[in-house]
Image (spheres, helix red, strand yellow):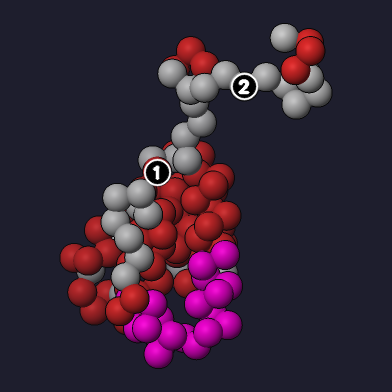
């Protein structure tokens, strides 16, 4: 739960998904994290020594993957994570971030400007 939970919280914060932020916050409290530490996640770069290097790196990776449309994930950061945690942890963390990224992004309805798609069962001749 540790690093993955913090990363998931940060992704939810990046996307502004209040329901997921609350759920991760409560899960992390249940897992033994202090509220003082959790409030640092949003401004983790300013937290200094209050967050361990592994936590800071996981939060940086979470942001890099969550904001992939505007900020590419850098090779140097990937290498830093590999050095701190190893390949298996990097893969697990990346998968958790990708899932949270999908779950935390706002959904758009046709009324909000999203594309309306035909139902999958509707064929060409049924237009």
Pick out the residue farthest to the front: 125
Q: Position of residue 120 (x, y in %)?
A: 75, 26
Residue at mark 1: 15
Q: Position of residue 46 (x, y in %)?
A: 18, 65
Query: Which residues make up the magenta segment?
Result: 77-95
Viewer-side residue, 42 vs 73 = 73
Sort mark 2 into few (<14), some (14-19) or many (20+) by Cα contacts within 10 Å: few
Left or right, 124 with respect to 77, comes to right
Please, is residue 28 above or below residue 26 in the view? below
Q: Position of residue 57 (x, y in %)?
A: 35, 75
Pick out the residue farthest to the top: 127
Quadrant, the N terminus: bottom right
Helix, strand or loop at disc 1?
helix
User: In the image, what residue occupies the spot 46% across and 68% down?
Assistant: 33
Quadrant, the C terminus: top right
Mark 2 / mark 1, whichever is N-terminal: 1
Q: Position of residue 123 (x, y in %)?
A: 78, 19
The label shown at residue 117 is 2
User: In the image, what residue occupies the spot 40% across and 43% down?
Assistant: 15
Kindly report the secondary structure that dominates the magenta region of the rendered protein: helix
């Amino acid at each position: 739960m540790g690093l993955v939970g913090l990363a998931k919280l940060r992704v939810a914060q990046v996307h502004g998904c209040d329901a997921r932020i609350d759920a991760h916050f409560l899960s992390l409290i249940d897992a033994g994290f202090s509220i003082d530490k959790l409030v640092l996640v949003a401004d983790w770069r300013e937290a200094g020594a209050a967050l361990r290097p592994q936590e800071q790196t996981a939060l940086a990776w979470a942001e890099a993957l969550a904001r992939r449309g505007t900020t590419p994930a850098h090779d140097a950061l990937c290498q830093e994570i590999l050095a701190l945690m190893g390949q298996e942890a990097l893969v697990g963390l990346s998968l958790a971030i990708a899932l949270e990224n999908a779950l935390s992004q706002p959904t758009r309805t046709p009324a909000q400007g999203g594309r309306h798609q035909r139902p999958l069962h509707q064929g060409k001749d049924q237009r």
